[in-house]
Amino acid sequence: MKAILLTIGNEILIGQIQDTNSQYISKQLGHIGVEVMEIRSISDGEKEIYDALTESCEKADIIISTGGLGPTKDDITKKTLSDFLGSPMVYDPEIFEHIKYLFSKIGRVPNEVNKEQAYHPNITQTLKNEMGTAPGLWTEWQGKLIINMAGVPYEMKHLMETQVIPRIKEKYTLPYILHRNLLTMGIPESELSLRLEDFEAQLPNNISLAYLPSGGRVKLRLSTKAATKALAEAQLEPQIEKLQATLGKDLLSTEEELVEKVIGQMLKEKSLRLACAESCTGGALAERITSLSGSSDYFLGSAVTYHTQAKINILNVP
Amino acid sequence: MKAILLTIGNEILIGQIQDTNSQYISKQLGHIGVEVMEIRSISDGEKEIYDALTESCEKADIIISTGGLGPTKDDITKKTLSDFLGSPMVYDPEIFEHIKYLFSKIGRVPNEVNKEQAYHPNITQTLKNEMGTAPGLWTEWQGKLIINMAGVPYEMKHLMETQVIPRIKEKYTLPYILHRNLLTMGIPESELSLRLEDFEAQLPNNISLAYLPSGGRVKLRLSTKAATKALAEAQLEPQIEKLQATLGKDLLSTEEELVEKVIGQMLKEKSLRLACAESCTGGALAERITSLSGSSDYFLGSAVTYHTQAKINILNVP
């Protein structure tokens, strides 16, 4: 199954906000064996949404949109979906009851604008949104599945976890997608590429290799899919062994690990404790280290001495 | 001028990395008056890149891609561009000299794979990349401008700042795009929408209003464009006054401000200095404060006491 994600909203196109929803949705879909073939951010325009729905339905099996389900005039995803499906809007009193309930919790009553949120295209099922007033929409149409969710991240995540993912798993028989990230260090991408020429030539068609350079490291990602996790692992395992044989000690790790994690493990093994003194990094070093649970076993703290006087007083910098 | 951004690379589609390039590029283009109409993430597939170039050239004036310019086999943006343009690859010795120079700085010599990076489509100009081995590509083709950059964020930013932005400004006469974000607090979106019904009805066609809810706040964004900054401001100013009159004290601020900036301004005004003691936030508080330039005027530093012993020794917590 192939999916296209649509993020709807001018705020992404003008760079006002970072679209973090797509990464979350891509990961969740990958875990259940749905492949994301495209992510597209478009404006809140009627033509743009209509065209994106048309083009996505031509290419993918599952189309998931976020954004444009709010009660205000600039949000037109639902109306455009209704036009696209040729399915008129119907009123759902149960949704309005839920909206009333949400408003009562903050001591308010919903108004006519909120009532609009209780309408949806006739052929569409709704997904109850416990976290907000806009229900998710689930439409099975001409062999395609179209899902629409609000763009607010915690509402979207709640719908994904409680309804979208379980329902997709139930509806389709899905393969297992497996990615393995292997870490190399200190070898330029071009040199790696030459050393892996024979390896790449023998790779079966159902396994792909990607190079992901960043700083002095190059991550190698092997990807495959199979009917089950065990089969996917059995496909990759011999390839990973070949990589180990080819690269020897230049292959630092066959797992994707963070530098702060590797350092943490070394400290734990040697029963050492770490304290930092920071200036320009302004606490960022301590933040990286403390982002790992269990870091209190070895991390004492950091003196963030930003001001010159603090460097003199606290660190005895002359 | 309308632009489409293409981010090329499976690592975004599988959710392995967050695409931060698009937000940066969107913002930079907005500042010089280029409107981003779509952002699309696609895989490193030949058909996918070719189709995306075709479709983007039908819709937009400027197409900017990032990713897929590396020396390894999985990077095929340049080859696909050459097919798309019908312009054969030519070798550019000057680029290879630059690659040799970059390798010499790390005590290495480039190999045959790197030599591939010195080829580009015949009709394409190259943009010198001081930060990496893949030059940017600048192609003027059938009235369209196609720009390709490496996906590594610091290489992309360097090319944007030093070449892409200045050259786009030189090539086109661009309008000024103005966004103003106004902050409301404590009023549900639906209620705001009703209170602003008359305001929205009278808004001229060249000004748009968007509602951006997050937590208990709703940001209102007014957007317009005009030939100059002064004209754009003159268009928005009367509308902001109307909003102030309509919302009264419910309009908290007519600027988009970060909490750390407001605090910084208050400290400066009162000539006070700030020091922090952090535990669970592990340096994040200091990082937020020091992310603003000029914070050394009022910020001394932070004692990040993560470990219990550090809290006792440094903060005298009993």
Image (tube, coloured by chain):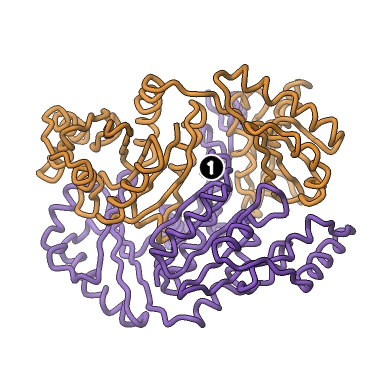
Chain colours: A purple, B orange
Q: Is residue A63 above or below residue B277?
A: below
In the image, what residue occupies the spot 74% across and 30% down?
B254
Q: In this view, which residue lies farthest toward the right?
A: A107
Q: Is residue A201 above or below residue B88?
A: below
Horizontal relation, residue A86 to residue A184: left or right: right
- Residue A257 visible (yes or no): no
Q: Secondary structure at mark 1?
A: helix
* Mark 1 belongs to chain: A
Image coords of residue A54 (percent x, y)? 46, 60
Where is residue A222, by image quadrant? bottom left
Q: What amino acid is labelled 1 in the image?
A: Ala
| Image quarter in which the N terminus of chain B is found | top left
Horizontal relation, residue B259 to residue B149: left or right: right
Image coords of residue A53 (percent x, y)? 49, 59
Q: Nearer the viewer, residue A120 or A86?
A: A86
Image coords of residue B290 (percent x, y)? 60, 33
Q: Nearer the viewer, residue A292 or B56?
A: B56
- Residue B270 visible (yes or no): yes
Q: Is residue A70 above or below residue B31?
A: below
Where is residue B209, by image quadrant? top right
Horizontal relation, residue A14 to residue B164: left or right: right
Image coords of residue B92 (percent x, y)? 13, 31
Residue highlighted by disc 1: A284
In the image, what residue occupies the spot 80% across and 45% down?
B192
